[in-house]
Structure formats: structure tokens, C-alpha cells
Image (cartoon, rainbow, N blue to C red):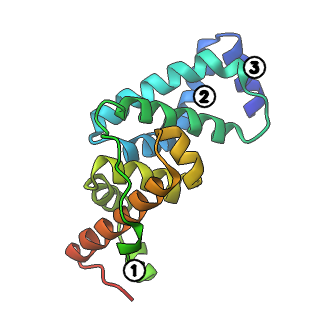
Amino acid sequence: MNEDEIIKGCIDNDVHFQKLLYERFAPKMMGVSLRYCNSKMEAEDVLQDAFIKIFDKIGTFRKQGSFEGWIRKIVVYTALKSNDKRVKKFEPGDIENVKEQSFDATAISKIETKDLLKILQQLPEGYKTVFNLYAVEGYSHKEIGKMLKISEVTSRTQYSRAKQHLIKLLTKYGITRQ
């Protein structure tokens, strides 16, 4: 069944089409949710809330981008809203003190996805959120600043500090720099 048919069925509140939509996108969106949450249970709650929003707002999808991208955005915003109570607001840091470091991409590619997810979940909340939004989801620091109500400089600082923290964690797991 094609995407347009599923969307139309969901707009009509047809449970069969809602189930098809959920089955098609939930596994991938669970991965998105897990990157922003501290536990699988929390990620499942976020995913459920996101799909409720998706079903409520599916009639507003205007095909100005991919449908999956639209769904992903709802999942990300739902996760961020869920994290609002836990994530402390950032203070601008001294970005000049942050050094760029790189790792052997081959070594990183050997890490199982689930293990990499566990490493990412060890980041402090703010670092994890900015890292996911910038490095994984592709938002700009300006967009991140607006979403999180922080400055663009603070977003850049948090991203750089997240990378530093990841370097320490990756080193702990035996992944070395180039």
C-alpha cells in the first residue's frame, strides 16, 4: 500500500491505516526517540505520545518535504518537550577552549548500533540533546537555539563539549583517535 493511501486512511481515522502507518514508521522512530531519552520505557512513552500527535495532525501534512521527515520532526519535538523538565538550561561557555578532535571512522563503524546508542545515552542531557539535533538530525545551531531557547553560541559550545565527552567515552571503550 502506498504512502498516500495510508495518509488518506489515517485522515479518515481508519484504525487499519493507522496500524499500517505505525508498523511502517514506529521501529525507525523508536531509534530517534531512544537518542533523546534515558531509557527504553521513556522512549516508548515519547513514541506513543508522538504517534497520537501524528494521528491528530496528519491532515496538516502538506507534502512540502518527505512524510518520514514530517513524522521525525514530531517525534523529535515530542522528545524535547518530554525532556524540558529534566534538561537544565545552558550557560554560554568559553568556546575557544574547546578543541576539535577526530576518531578513526573505521573503528567507530565497527561499534554495534545498540552499543553506540548506549554511549550516546551516557552524555549529560544538554549535550545529548544538542548533539542529536545537530549531528544526527541535521538542524543548524540557529534552529537548535530557537528550539531550546538558548543562543546559537551556547548550542555550538554544547555540541563541542558533547564531542569532547564522547571522545572520553569512546576512548574508554577502546576507540582511539586517528
Residues tagged 3 and 1 counted as in contact (Cβ below 8 A): no
Q: CA distance from mark 2 to mark 3?
A: 11 Å
Instruction: State which quadrant residue 99 falls in.
Output: bottom left
Locate the N terminus and report the quarter of the image it occupies.
top right
Tag 1 secondary structure: loop
| First in sequence: mark 3 vs mark 1 | 3
Image height of 175 relative to 33, above or below:
below
Q: CA distance from mark 2 to mark 1?
A: 41 Å
On the image, the x and y values in percent for residue 90 come to 35, 47
- For disc 3, the neighbor class at 10 Å (few under 14, some 14 to 19, many from 20) is some
Q: Which residue is mark 3?
A: 8
On the image, the x and y values in percent for residue 176 come to 31, 83
Instruction: State which quadrant residue 165 falls in.
Output: bottom left
Question: Is residue 47 something that shows in the picture?
Answer: yes
Q: Which residue is mark 1?
A: 101
Q: Which residue is mark 2?
A: 21
- For disc 1, the neighbor class at 10 Å (few under 14, some 14 to 19, many from 20) is few
| Label of residue 17 in the image | none
